[in-house]
Image (cartoon, rainbow, N blue to C red):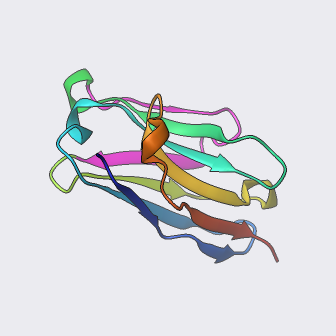
């Protein structure tokens, strides 16, 4: 079973930055695409960024709502995937999760809360 542990959330003012990290256990990490997802109150969970496996070049892709502001990266030695979030907006407020892409149902972690507010 793969465990994913997110960290790095917090309270930030509009226009600020945060960096989220996800530590993964298990050997399948390197061979799979990874994603960062978020769920705002009253809304469905959505994929905001994904990065392909190392075998397919580690190519990133982003939801239109975060394109140009968020950057996803992965470290296949540390088994981690990070999300650098810049120019944060109040509408980015949500619980952020990492998981495989497509996600594994049993691999959802606790997530990390990001709140963007003045």
Query: Looking at the rendering, in which quadrant would you find the C terminus?
Result: bottom right
Q: Is residue 89 above or below residue 45?
A: below
Which one is in front, 31 or 54?
Answer: 31
Q: Is residue 53 left or right of residue 110?
A: left
Q: Residue at x 68, y 75 (%)?
A: 12
Q: Position of residue 102 (x, y in %)?
A: 47, 28
Which one is in front, 104 or 71?
Answer: 104
Residue 87 visible within the image: no
Q: Give the farthest residue toward the top.
A: 56
Q: Is residue 7 magenta?
A: no
Q: Is residue 81 left or right of residue 103?
A: left
Which residues make up the magenta segment?
57-75
Q: Position of residue 75 (x, y in %)?
A: 24, 50
Residue 30 in which image quadrant: top left
Q: Is residue 4 left or right of residue 53?
A: right
Q: Residue at x 54, y 60 (%)?
A: 111
Q: How many marks?
A: 0
Q: Is residue 79 left or right of residue 15?
A: left
Which one is in front, 15 or 22?
Answer: 22
Residue 100 visible within the image: yes
Q: Position of residue 109 (x, y in %)?
A: 48, 56
Q: Is residue 68 magenta?
A: yes
Which one is in front, 1 or 93?
Answer: 1
Q: Residue at x 59, y 58 (%)?
A: 86
Q: Position of residue 54 (x, y in %)?
A: 22, 32
Q: Residue at x 67, y 77 (%)?
A: 11
Residue 32 in which image quadrant: top left
Q: Is residue 99 above or below residue 22?
A: above
């Amino acid at each position: 079973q793969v465990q994913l542990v997110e960290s790095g959330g917090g309270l930030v003012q509009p226009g600020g930055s945060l960096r989220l990290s996800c530590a993964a256990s298990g050997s399948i990490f390197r061979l799979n695409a990874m994603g960062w997802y978020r769920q705002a109150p009253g809304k469905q969970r959505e994929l905001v960024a994904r990065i392909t496996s190392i075998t397919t070049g580690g190519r990133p892709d982003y939801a239109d709502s975060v394109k140009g502001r968020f950057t996803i990266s992965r470290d296949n030695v540390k088994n981690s995937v990070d999300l650098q979030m810049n120019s944060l907006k109040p509408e980015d407020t949500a619980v952020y999760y990492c998981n495989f892409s497509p996600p594994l149902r049993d691999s959802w972690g606790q997530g990390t809360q990001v709140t963007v507010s003045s």
